[in-house]
Amino acid sequence: MPYKLLFVCLGNICRSPAAENIMNHLIQQAGLSDRVICDSAGTSSYHIGSPPDRRMTAAINQIGIAMQGRARQFTPTDFETFDLILAMDRDNFANVCYLDPAGRFKHKVRLMCDFCTHHSLKEVPDPYYGGTEGFNQVIALLMDACTGLLAFVQQELATCR
Ligand code: 4NP
């Protein structure tokens, strides 16, 4: 069974699709495409069915990574499907946990920035209402976090299966 990662933000058009596509890139580079699966979702229903934001896509393309996917909303069945759920900020974290009132899946939900080793920010800032710099900051943070996350997943694959 592949290890399954779900990245979660508010709209599923900026931060979480960027995380998903960056992570897929790193997974491919590491030769782990058949062992790790990535998906992303939003806590809101605002953008269901939409492609990623064109400003986020442009920034991701600039670092040589393609952007794929359509927005969907997080659903409680995701708790069963995925091994690890990565929330971009504390609001996303709280909104995901709200759908697990008994705390059965608490161990699966983490803040994305917990996996950063170079940046000290604890949340991936919402870039939606800002300028280009916000999107580039999201990418720098996600590169750091995804690198740390890859190391964590490699450990999980080595020890737990
Ligand atoms: P995301 O960014 O959560 O990173 O996808 C946002 C996208 C849309 C909105 C807010 C944040 N919105 O309010 O529509």
Image (spheres, rainbow, N blue to C red):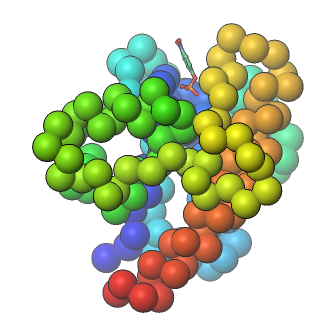
Residue at image position (36%, 84%) is: 160
Residue 158 visible:
yes
**Corner quadrant of residue 24:** bottom right
Q: Is residue 88 above or below residue 34?
A: above
**Corner quadrant of residue 42:** top left
Residue at image position (85%, 41%) is: 62
How far from the left and from the top, in percent, is residue 124? 64, 36
Q: Quadrant of the N terminus?
A: bottom left
How far from the left and from the top, in percent, is residue 35? 46, 76
Residue 21 visible:
no
Q: Nearer the viewer, residue 52 or 108?
A: 108
How far from the left and from the top, in percent, is residue 83? 34, 62
Q: Quadrant of ligand 1?
A: top right
**Corner quadrant of residue 129:** top right
Residue furthest out toward the top:
129
Residue at image position (61%, 37%) is: 123
Image-based side of 48 in relation to 122, left or right: left
How far from the left and from the top, in percent, is residue 114? 58, 53
Residue furthest out toward the left:
102
Q: Quadrant of the C terminus?
A: bottom left
Q: Nearer the viewer, residue 81 or 91?
A: 91
